[in-house]
Each structure stands twice: as C-alpha cells, then as structure tokens.
Amino acid sequence: MEENSQPQEAAKLPENAFRELKEGETYKPLMPAGSHPREADAWSVTWGLVMVIIFSAATAYLGLKVGQVFEAAIPIAIIAVGLSGVTRRRGAMGENVIIQSIGACSGSVVAGAIFTLPALYILQAKYPDISVDFVKVFLASFLGGALGIFFLIPFRKYFVRDMHGKYPFPEATATTQVLVSGEGGGTGSLMLLLKAGVIGGLYDFAVASFGLWNEQFTSRVCSLGNMIADKAKFVFKLNTGAAVLGMGYIVGLKYSAVICAGSVLVWWIIVPCIALLFPDMQIASGTGAGTVAASQASPEVLFAYARSVGIGAIAMAGIIGIIKSRKIVVGAISLARREMTKKSNAEETSERTQKDIPMKIIIFGTALTLIVVFCFFLFGVMGGNLLYAVVGILLVALIAFLFTTVAANAIAIVGSNPVSGMTLMTLILTSVIMVAVGLRGTAGIVAALLMGGVVCTALSMAGSFVTDLKIGYWLGTTPKVQESYKFLGTLVAALTVGGVMIVLNNTYGFTGDALAAPQAHAMAAVIEPLMNGGSAPWLLYGIGAAIAIVLDMLGISALAFALGMFIPLELNLPLLVGGLISWKVKRAGKTAEEKHAADERGTLIASGFIAGGALMGVVSAAMRFAGLDLTLSAWVDNPLSQLLSIVVYALLIIGFFTMVRQKKAA
C-alpha cells in the first residue's frame, strides 16, 4: 500500500466537517477516496490488540469499582499518535484509526459484560445452584458484540454520512481532533490541543488520584443545604471535572439544555413529590438492608427509584425512533434483498471511503451468529428445552436489532449510551415473557441474565462502533477495513474480560465494598423477584413513556430528555455549563470568519479537556488497581473541599475563555 499522498501540513479537517452541508455540497475527507493510505497492517493490528487487552482489564476494574466505564477511544488515539511520532512513521493516520478502532472494543465489550453478568456471581451467593463459568461469560460477550457489529453496518451510511452535521458526536469529535493534530495538523492546533490536554489531564488527575479538591460541588456543603436535602428532598449537584465540561461544549447548548431539563424534572420535581405525596411508601434502601419509607429516604435513594421513569422514557423514545426510522430499516432490508439477488456486486464500483462489508456476508454472518446464540441458549443455558431457546433467540434478535438505532442515536447526541437502562428494560420484558412460557426460578435467572448480557453487549458495541465509523468518515478510512477488524478486537476483548471478571470475583468478590458493581446489583434486584413471582414498576415506566410521547409531539428530542432523567444530576449540569460556554464562544467575533475561528479553537480546547481527563483516568485506575491510594480522604470529606472545587472550576472556565481569545500561533 502507498502512503497517504497528502503533505503533512495539509492535515486539517475541512471547514464543513462539523456543520450541515448546503444543497449540492459534499464532504471530502482528509484522506481522499482516491488515495491509498496504510490501514490494517502488522503494526496497527498488533498495537490495536495490545490496547484491547490493556484497556479491557483497566475498564473492567474501574467499571465494577465505581459503575462508570470510561471510553477508551481517546486515550488509545493519543497513544497511537505518540507511537507513530516516536517511531517517525509518516502518513500513519490510517493506521492510527485502525489501532483506535480495534482498541475501542475494550470499552464496549466490558460495559456489556460488567453491567449484567456479575449479577450471576451476586445471586450465586444466595442460590448455590446457579452456575457461571468462563465459557458462558465469553460467549455472551463475544456473540453480543458480533451481533452489534452486524446490526449496525447497514445503518452506517445513514448515521455517519446522510446525517452529516446534524449530530454533535462529542467523543468522535474529540478523538478525531487528536488524530488530526497528531498528523501535522498545524503547529498552532497541535500545541493548543496538547496544552488543553495537559491542563484537563492534570486537573482531573489531581482530583481522582489525590483528592486535592472534591470532584463535585453539592448543596450539602452547608447545614442549610443538608436540611433542605433531608426535609424537602432537594439537592444540587455539579461535577467539576474538566472532561465533563469539555463534553458539554461539544454537545452544545441545544442538546445539553434538553438533557438538563429531563434531569431537573426527576431530581427537583418528581423526587420531592414522591416524598411529599407518598411519605409511607417503602423504597429499596440501596444498601441491601431492606426498604425505607419515602419520607425518610435521601434524594439519591429516591432517584434510584424515580429513574425508572427515565427507563420508560428511553424505551418509548427508542420505539418512536424505530417508527420514525422505519424507512431506513426498510431500506437496509431492501438493500439486503437486492444484494442477494443481483449478479454483480455494487461494492466493487463504490469509492473506497464508502465501501462496507458486502451485504451478502453481513446477512450470512448475522444468520450464523444467531444460530450459534441459539445453540448456546439451547444446550448451554436452557437445558435442551427447545421452546425456551426459540423464545430466547427471538427476543434477543428483535430487541438487539430494534434498539441498535437507539444506541447509535444516543452516542451521536450526547456521547453516552444508556445501555444499562435499555438492558434493564430488556431484562424485565425477558423475565415476564420467559416466566409466561414456564421458565422461572434459578434457571430463569441464569437464562435471563445471559440473554441480557448478549443484548447489553450488542447495544454497547453498536453505540461504540458508530463513533469509530464517524471518525473514519471524517478522516477518510475504509469502512470495510474498520468493520472487518472490529470482530477480531471483539474476540480478544471477550476473552480478556471473561478472565478478568473471574479473577476479580475470586480476589474481591462482588458482594462487598471492594467492587460495588452497581449496575449488576440493580439487575439482580430487578430480576430476582420477577423470576420468583414479583412485579416491576410498570406505573413509572408508563409515566416515562407518556412523557416521551408528549415531548415528541412538541418537537423536543425525547431521547435526550430521557437520558437526562436516567443519568445522575451531577453529570448533566456540567453539560449545560459546557453548552453555555459553547454558545458564548460561537458569538465571540464580529465576522463569520472570526466566529468560526473562535469555535474551532473552543472545540480543540474541549477535545483536549476530554482527552486529558480520559487518559489520566486510565492512570488513576491503574494506580488503584495496583493498590496505590493517595487520596486525602479526610480533606475530601471536609465541606471546604467542595468550596475549593467550585473556585478551581471557575478558574478552569476562565482559563478556557482565555485560551479561546489567544491569537493563533503562526
């Protein structure tokens, strides 16, 4: 293969990369369709697989520890750029995209596995006849990941090309900026990105590793705030991290405002109303110590109950999205039919940057994967019962396929995939249906959780992979190459996470304080009563569904609003802060050129904040995994640390504006 023929200094994204295209306008990627960049070779594939193994272990530990899986795409992109720089590999952008794309399998597979499958270990302590082993964990993770890839590919052109400029794609934007700046994107742009990355990384590292100030500011900083939280169930929370602030900038004011509106509805209206109107209602305490009356519960405990409204809204927003995108689904099916019947292959005549894996292979691969999943259910999960296996495979295939577009939409809008919420709804529906056909008890628990693991990994993979494909679209890589090697990365990630999960369970266990595994505990808490004759909070799901319908009728993004109802308040309010900064920066200048230049610098700074925060998050996770805890716990618990956090946060925002105003380096 030839190297990318573009000169180094030309590595800069086109002006229309992030905005909607005008009529008749086309987007030309950084590596044109007629070029022949190096992509999948021994260098990129080897380093991609190394990244998969390292980041699968790191994200599994951190995700089980705090319930948050950091996206590995940005840190891997930084490492890839660094490796190509140290070894002086020219024209390495195509290789770096492949390293990032393969390596990013770690986060998606890990999220799918750790949100569901640890629930088997948790319930095994109560029900000794529940069996869980490496093979089951591996198969659920790998088969789910493969389904997610196959289901997303037919929708690639819609999300990454046809919807050009309509979605912000925050994580893809940040990762792309890293890759471009590392490929000779101009000294000024590279230095600005590096400067922002150092600032954002050190800022978040100081909090995560040392606790120099609190990671969030809350209204509980004073006695009055504590009293209001206890009596009125009203609390204010703001994460003061640099990475989340940068994410808000790229998401923009429009979507961040809708997301925050959903969060405000749940935290500041629904939660207080539950305690006020239903004071004696018993709610799970969240500590495993039974229930507590709503009037005595904290706002956080009430939110854990009320977020079911968000789950219902996410499900309905997904259904609405499916209905609205029915033409896309029908188009994908029609394309598949045409590809299967015609003699010539259209993919041979399409340009390199639009070549996907041929539809015939996609259909065959999907069918083969579903057959393997069916055999896994039949012989490995459901004891040879044909009825249970048939119902199981139909549920998994239908839910995973329909919610693929929902996962992709969520990532495109806010950079966060509500996979745990969709999986929780999947578990509830699966449990109800499987109980109806006769499968219940511990056998039903194992079956439903493994089915949920397959669906969760599929949706996680679909959401993550659309980010990789968008990066490839902006830069000009070959989709077919990305799609092909994604399966290899998924295989290695599934093998790694299966082994890591067993090691962590044997070392720490999932029932103590060492590894909280919050999502898995939630899954276990929901599925156990359902499989033993209990029920789900259908009323709350219905309220959320009704809210989504009304929002859609008003022309408001129901999915963005639903995400706000499901994601904690402290992670939503910073998005609004970043969105307001974006709104202000885009108006900094008298001419259109000055405003565009300011926004371009703002995007680079925000990307640097995200990249630096994500990379140092990996370092902090590695330190914790090694048992190196340097956190000043006594200081973090002191209310003054929260006051310091808001002061430092204000200085960070001032620094953001200062860097935007600085003149570009020559």
Image (cartoon, helix red, strand yellow):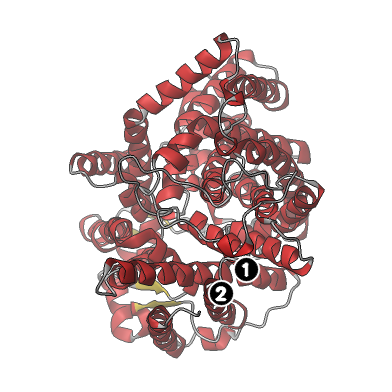
- Image vertical order of residue 478 relative to residue 499, above or below: above
- Image vertical order of residue 621 relative to residue 204, above or below: above
Q: Which secondary structure lies at badge 1?
A: helix
Viewer-side label of 1, 2: 2
Q: Is residue 320 left or right of residue 662?
A: left
Numbered label tally: 2
- Percent position (x, y) of residue 515? 64, 61
Within-10-Å neighbours for mark 2: few <14, some 14–19, many 20+? many
Front-most of residues 443 and 559:
559
Q: In the rendered image, is residue 616 in sight?
A: yes
Q: Amino acid at mark 2?
A: Gly
The quarter of the displayed image where residue 509 is located:
bottom right
Q: Is residue 65 left or right of residue 166?
A: right
Within-10-Å neighbours for mark 1: few <14, some 14–19, many 20+? many
- Percent position (x, y) of residue 613? 56, 71
Q: Is residue 116 left or right of residue 421?
A: right
Q: Amino acid at mark 1?
A: Leu
- Percent position (x, y) of residue 478? 62, 40
Are the residues at dot 1 and dot 2 in contact (C-beta closer than 8 Å)? yes
Front-most of residues 486 and 296:
486
- Image vertical order of residue 93 relative to residue 541, above or below: below
- Percent position (x, y) of residue 218? 37, 77
Tell me the quarter of the image containing the N terminus. Answer: top right
Q: Earlier in the sequence, mark 1 or mark 2?
A: 2
Q: Give the numbered dot on residue 553.
A: none
Question: On the image, numbered disc 2 is attached to which residue?
Answer: 197
Q: Which secondary structure lies at badge 2?
A: helix
- Residue at (68%, 63%) from the top-left corner? 81
Q: Give the numbered dot on residue 615.
A: 1
